[in-house]
Image: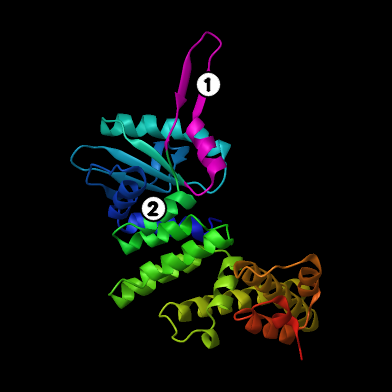
Amino acid sequence: MPSAAHEWMVALLTDDPGRLDVLLRAVRQMGLRARFVVVDAAVHLVDAVELRPDALLIDPDTGRWLALEVQLQIDEEKRTMWPLLAAYLTRKHGTMGDVLVITHDASVATWASAGWRVEGALGSSQGFAPAVLLLGEVEARVLLAAPSPQMAFFAAWAMQKRHGPAAQDIAMAALRRADEIEDPTLKLSLIRSILAVLSDALLEVLSVMFAHDRMPKLEPWLEELITRLEARGEARGEARGEARGEARGEARGEARGEARGEARALIRLLQRRGLALDAAAEARITACTDIDALDRWLDRAVTAVTLRDVFDEG
């Protein structure tokens, strides 16, 4: 089943192909140079074969086509289908177009860029290499500086598997750019799309850093963040409960999971604030299963000057 990161990327680009033009101009200094419209992505070669890119765009005036592939991991079978797809669309529309692979992973980008090539015993050869758009940290920062706040989604999408300091900075900046949108419906939609592609670990860090009682003023998007975290927590709890089939086991598992999550968030917060975290202190945090104690430490970590300020119960 496609992930949320995959589905949100496809949805935003097919909802408005103009976003792809803005994205390419921001990252690669080149636009689409055509008026594309979204068409049915199913490509029938013969009754037994169907090729289906993630999205298919056609310029009705020139016949130029653009097949979008959101690629989160290496897929050798899909790579062998790209030349077949390109050959069919070129013949059907009378002009060469592009297969555009969009990925957040440098290894996937390298794999896709290498393309596909085979040779026959007598020397015949065929091959194909798609265009590749890699959205990494550098590209994310470029997108955050773009005039359109809607590019904030693509910056956050680039951080989908990360939760370190750089990912935290980019996620925060993306949410703040989304907050610039005046239309409340469009703003909420963009905020939801950003939060949907961030990892659970990163969402936990954001919730710790910007909880209600630690902010002088609750920013508009924080309620959505808190709601999404609560929903994910409930979903994880239900999944564990079904697997165990016992309420007591679910409660124990939920408590352990919550403690591990709070411990990870505390360690990241201390590291982010530059407090020296030795092996003994880190072991004390990770071994703690007392949620109340972890909550107290998290509260103190926001303003602590030293580790003693965090752990001292005096």
Which residue: 44% across, 70% down? 192
Other-residue count near label 2 (Cα within 10 Å), few / some / many at <14 / 14–19 / ≥20? some
Residue 126 pos. (x, y %): 46, 21
When asked about the image quadrant of residue 202, the answer is bottom right
Q: CA distance from mark 1 to mark 2?
A: 37 Å
Which residue: 53% across, 36% down? 110
Label at residue 118: 1
> Hey, which residue is sitting farthest bottom in the picture?
314
Between marks 1 and 2 in the image, the one whose residue lies nearer the viewer? 2
As for residue 292 lying within the magenta part, the answer is no
> Hey, which residue is sitting farthest front in the picture?
305
What residue does disc 2 label?
Answer: 142
Residue 40 pos. (x, y %): 34, 49
Q: Amino acid at mark 1?
A: Val
Q: Is residue 246 visible?
A: no
Q: Amino acid at mark 2?
A: Val
Q: Is residue 257 visible?
A: yes
As for residue 110 lying within the magenta part, the answer is yes
